Amino acid sequence: MSSSSAASGIEPIADAVPLSLCAREPHVPADRLVAEMVPPPRFDSVRFATYIPDPNQPSQSEAVRVLESFATGLGGAPSAPAKRSLFGFGQTKAPKAPAGPRGVYLDGGYGVGKTHLLASLWHATPAEPALKAFGTFVELTNLVGALGFQQTVRTLSGHRLLCIDEFELDDPGDTVLVSTLLGKLVEAGVALAATSNTLPGKLGEGRFAAADFLREIQGLSAHFRTLRIDGEDYRHRGLPEAPAPFTDEQVAKTAYATEGASLDAFPELLEHLARVHPSRYGALTDGVKAVCVTDVGPVPDQSTALRLVVLADRLYDREVPVLASGLPFDRLFSEDMLKGGYRKKYFRAISRLTALARDAKGLVTA
């Protein structure tokens, strides 16, 4: 019996045995990590022309105008030679960046199209994909964790543009790390663009009070011109109501009936995530058409919760439906977690897993 069969506690009901995420231990080469720093499939086709500004929110039209101009301004000579190895050996010294901000910072609430605009900027920048990078803040820190700081600097310093989505500062270590990294990239002539739900000077406020941490925040914000994008903030609508879970039998039956589906028990999946570097969670889901999990329960601790957030992001980016039994997704995280410093991440994970659960309902057969 396969590990997925054992996890579900039932015998196979079809010739095709589901995949098991727990059986996968992907080893991702460094060049793939960098090559995959592009807008996710969900934002493949977005452009400035497909962004529809709210006529009652002039800041949205202004953001489009500024970003289009910003992209056009990146059409000159690249900041570093285009022909370069992954590790930057043999490259000539990049010219110093001009004075003043070398980036734009999109600030606004949920649902105003910040990621749409950021991806549109990436697409509009007149440079080959190898000279542009797009990733979430978490993906950027994971890249540093996988490659090392110096190698990450060498790898990205020849880029024309680095786009960072969901900019978050969750601890002083990450603050210093990213602030230093971006400073090095700005010196190398790399242009920056980022999104967040908080103004740069306010990032981390209310979480850490150390004076040196606040100094790091201010130094980081100086790299960006801030663009405020006003609009309806979906945070005030509360958490979306998660669909009612299915039974273990329904989840397992669907996994066996769906080509490319995976089947795992939730507790075992959480344990497996601890053994796989978060930078490899995308590779963990390669070829998976649906994720089926049984026995979903409360996430036991914060480290496990943050790993689950990363997996939820990768599944959402790839539009992989999630079918589950056990606890509804809106009850994954404790009240203390939802009131703590990482609450925005947990709210996002609940929202995304709920959306993927709705997508999975059509897979269930009687």
Image (tube, rainbow, N blue to C red):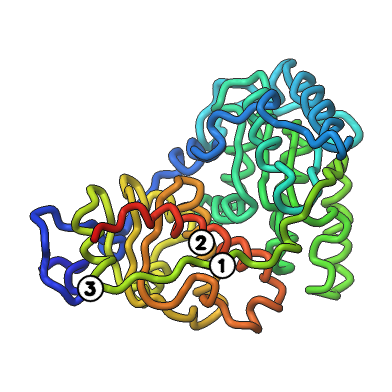
Q: Nearer the viewer, residue 12 or 169?
A: 12
Mark 2 residue type: Thr
Residue 129 lies, with reference to residue 331, above or below; the image says: above
- Residue mark closest to the camera, 3 vs 1: 1
Q: Is residue 229 left or right of residue 174?
A: right
First along the sequence among labels 2 and 3 = 3
Residue 185 lies, with reference to residue 220, above or below; the image says: above
Does residue 96 appear in the picture of this structure? no
Look at mark 1 in the image and give the residue it sits on: 241
- Residue mark closest to the camera, 2 vs 1: 1
Look at mark 3 in the image and give the residue it sits on: 8
First along the sequence among labels 2 and 1 = 1
Does residue 359 appear in the picture of this structure? yes
SS label for mark 2: helix
Q: Nearer the viewer, residue 202 or 211?
A: 202
Mark 3 residue type: Ser
The tag on residue 163 is: none
Mark 1 residue type: Glu
Q: Position of residue 228 (x, y in %)?
A: 86, 44
The tag on residue 354 is: 2
Question: How much space separates mark 2 and mark 3, taking CA atoms?
Answer: 22 Å
The structure residue drawn at horizontal position 85% and vertical position 50%, both measured from the top left corner, is: 221
First along the sequence among labels 3 and 1 = 3
The structure residue drawn at horizontal position 56% and vertical position 77%, both measured from the top left corner, is: 333
